[in-house]
Structures are given as structure tokens and as C-alpha cells.
């Protein structure tokens, strides 16, 4: 269903609107919330772990994109924010989150677009780059090379944390998720089935890519190594740590310049 019947499933997708928040019914009937603002060239923003689309509202980047005349599309990934939070493994396996993004852009009839990810959003975007030919430019923010390892210890550590086995390093994330009302089972499944894009796959990409990270952001591996793995890519290091870089003016300026 997920791969062999893409076009058939697309016929059964639908969009409804409640205020400025729109809802897209994806390939498996999971409801995905998103916003769609502006009328220019489309840019898809992909949020990070224990985040929602509303985190981008805190960023200078979204403001600048709209001010520069871009159309900005920002979904809540499944399991987050106002989107449905399915509790079964099948709902997150086999690139379900990637298919949500592809189906949404197809339903919006967007023939080509740019995408910007941050943190786990960059991990999903890396996979999306290998799947969607409509994607012409991409920005991988807040991420180094480590996600290319299917046995990445940090991913496994956070998977275990949201399965009920946190350690000293992950307890703060679990506490934060509880404080904002995040769905812990969904977060566990997101880590369990997080897509892996190998360095070989990255090396076959033909689109233009910007890798951007804060100078104090080192938890996810070396961003320079990630840039080296992707042809036609550029690297930009700006001030900031992992939790704050995406909100900054320097981050926004570097991306606007790239676009």
C-alpha cells in the first residue's frame, strides 16, 4: 500500500480547514495538521523531535520567508501537535512520515519545492531527498553525520527513554515531553522507526543542499562530515546551540541567502 499504490491512495486523500489550521487525511487515514501561508515559491518546514509546527512560529526564518514572498507550508508530523497520534508500529514503519509529506505536497498540487528541516526534521528531509523528485533545494539544519548510522547510539538511547527506560542524559527530554503534553508512545515509535539515509545514498543526490548548524551544536555528529557526504552542498556555521539556533536571525539570513 505505502509504496506500490501511491497514486491510488492519493485519490482518497482529503483536506479540511478549521480556521487557519488545515487538516490533510493521509494515505492511511491519519489526519495531519498544517498551515499554508503566503503565495510565492513553496517552502516546506519540517520540525524536530518533541516539537510541533508552532515552534517555527518562534523563528526569524518563518517571518523572513513570508516577508521575502515565499509560500510557507508547515505540518505537524504524525504523532505531534494537532496531528493524529497513532499508537501502532505500522503507522510509523516504512517511511510513513515521508509519505505524509509527499502526499501533502501532491494534494496541494505543488510541482516543485524547497524544504527546510531542523534536528530530527533534517533526518526526515534527508530521506525525503532520496524519494521526491519535486524537491529542488534542501536545508539540513542542526544535524551532523551520525544519523546515517542505522545503529546510532543516540537514537537508540532516546528510543529506550520513551519506552520507559530513560538515563541521566535522556531524563530531561522525557520530563520536557511530559510537561508539554507530548504523546510518549508516539515519540517512542518515531525513534524506533526513524528513517536511515546512508552516506552512499546521500552521495547520489543531485539537488542543491545547505548544511547549517550552530557553533555549539555537537550532539548529532560533525556537520562538516555531513556536508562532505552530499555533492553540490554548502556548509554554514552560525552562532548558537541546538535548541536555539533555528530561532536566530543568523540562521534565517544564511538560509535566505542560500535560497
Image: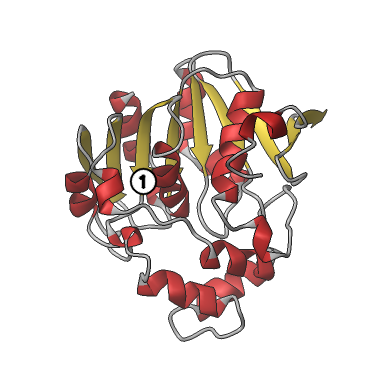
Q: Nearer the viewer, residue 199 or 36?
A: 199
Q: Does dot 1 land on a helix, a strand or a loop? A: strand
Where residue 73 appears, as percent x and y from the top left, is 58, 30
Say whether residue 76 is left or right of residue 31.
left
Q: Nearer the viewer, residue 238 or 28?
A: 28
Say which residue appears at 56% left-offset and 86% top-offset: 165
Where residue 59 appears, as percent x and y from the top left, is 48, 40
Task: Please say whether residue 19 is visible from this viewpoint.
Answer: no
Say which residue appears at 56% left-offset and 54% top-offset: 94
Q: Residue furthest front?
A: 4
Quadrant of the frame with the N terminus: top right
Where residue 63 appears, as percent x and y from the top left, is 50, 29
Q: Quadrant of residue 217?
A: bottom left
- Count residues near mark 1 (Cα–Cα under 10 Å), then give few for <14, some for 14-19, many for 20+: many
Say which residue appears at 78% left-offset and 31% top-offset: 12
Say whether residue 144 is left or right of residue 77.
left
| Number of marks drawn | 1
Q: Answer above or below: position of 5 versus 168.
A: above
Q: Answer above or below: position of 38 versus 135.
A: above
Say whether residue 82 is left or right of residue 37.
right
Where residue 60 appears, as percent x and y from the top left, is 45, 35
Which residue is denoted by mark 1 in the rendering?
141
Say which residue appears at 57% left-offset and 54% top-offset: 51
Q: Nearer the viewer, residue 30 or 64?
A: 30
Quadrant of the frame with the C terminus: top left
Task: Please say whether residue 98 is visible from this viewpoint.
Answer: yes
Q: How is the image coloured?
A: secondary structure
Amino acid at each position: 500500500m505505502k509504496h506500490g499504490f501511491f497514486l491510488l491512495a492519493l485519490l482518497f486523500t482529503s483536506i479540511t480547514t478549521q480556521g487557519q489550521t488545515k487538516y490533510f487525511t493521509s494515505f492511511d487515514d491519519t489526519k495531519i495538521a498544517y498551515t499554508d501561508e503566503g503565495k510565492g515559491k513553496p517552502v516546506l518546514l519540517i520540525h524536530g523531535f518533541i516539537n510541533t509546527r508552532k515552534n517555527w512560529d518562534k523563528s526569524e526564518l518563518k517571518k523572513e520567508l513570508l516577508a521575502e514572498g515565499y509560500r510557507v507550508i508547515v505540518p505537524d508530523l504524525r504523532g505531534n501537535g494537532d496531528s493524529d497520534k497513532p499508537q501502532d508500529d505500522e503507522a510509523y514503519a516504512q517511511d510513513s512520515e515521508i509519505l505524509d509529506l509527499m502526499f501533502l505536497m501532491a494534494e496541494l498540487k505543488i510541482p516543485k519545492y524547497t524544504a527546510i528541516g531542523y534536528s530530527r526534521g533534517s533526518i526526515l528531509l534527508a530521506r525525503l531527498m532520496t524519494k521526491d523528485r519535486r524537491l529542488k533545494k534542501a536545508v539540513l539544519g542542526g544535524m551532523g553525520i551520525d544519523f546515517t548510522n542505522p545503529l546510532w547510539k543516540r537514537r537508540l538511547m532516546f528510543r529506550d527513554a520513551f519506552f520507559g527506560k530513560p538515563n541521566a542524559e535522556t531524563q530531561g527530554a522525557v520530563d520536557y515531553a511530559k510537561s508539554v503534553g507530548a504523546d510518549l508512545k508516539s515519540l517512542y515509535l518515531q525513534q524506533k522507526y526513524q528513517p536511515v539515509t546512508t552516506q552512499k545514498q546521500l552521495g547520489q543526490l543531485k539537488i542543491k543542499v545547505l548544511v547549517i548548524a550552530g557553533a555549539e551544536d555537537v550532539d548529532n555528529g560533525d556537520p562538516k562530515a555531513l556536508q562532505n557526504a552530499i555533492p553540490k552542498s554548502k556548509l554554514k556555521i552560525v552562532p548558537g546551540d541546538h535548541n536555539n539556533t533555528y530561532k536566530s536571525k543568523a540562521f534565517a539570513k544564511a538560509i535566505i541567502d542560500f535560497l
